[in-house]
Image (cartoon, rainbow, N blue to C red):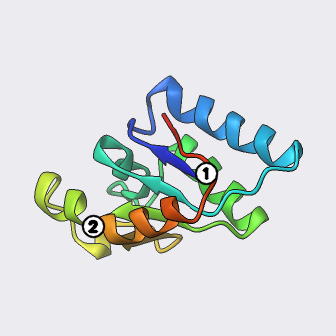
Amino acid sequence: MLSVHVAPDHPRSLLALNFAQAALISGQRIRQIFFYQEGILHAQLDTESQLHPSAEAWLRFAQQHSLPLVVCSTVVEQDFDLTAAQLHPGYSLGGLTEFSSAVAQCERLVQF
């Protein structure tokens, strides 16, 4: 499982994506990618209903491999005051309960 805590314009976002791609190539399984703290900004649409380029790359990767992209609903609402309408539908809202459940079922968690 991967947890992304950096904004989409941070270099570690693409580092995390490269890591995820390499993990799948090497035969690892990824259950979910969870976006927390500034990482939730990956799902935010700009004023022209577009995603940041690295967030778009995450979306393509997730669609290609049927992986859920989950953004922390508490952070979305409380820390960034965003609504579901301001998020790309390819990213789903979830809470720390979903995160904890996914972590409990995986072998390791890698955080960026």
Packing grade of label 1 (10 A; few <14, some 14-19, many >=20) is many
Element assignment for label 1:
helix
- Label 1 vs label 2, nearer the camera: 2
**Counting other residues with Cα less than 10 Å from the Cα at mark 2, is it few (<14), some (14-19), or many (20 or more)?**
many
State the residue lying farthest toward the right: 26
Q: Residue at x 64, y 52 (%)?
A: 107
Quadrant hosting residue 46: bottom left
Residue 95 appearing in the image: no
Looking at the picture, which amino acid does disc 1 mark?
Trp
* Residue highlighted by disc 2: 73
Q: Nearer the viewer, residue 63 or 98?
A: 98
Q: Which x, y percent locates residue 102?
A: 51, 66
The residue shown at (17%, 53%) is 80
Q: Is residue 111 left or right of residue 37?
A: right
Give the CA separation, mark 1 to mark 2: 18 Å
44 to 23, vertically: above or below: below
Callout 2 amino acid: Ser
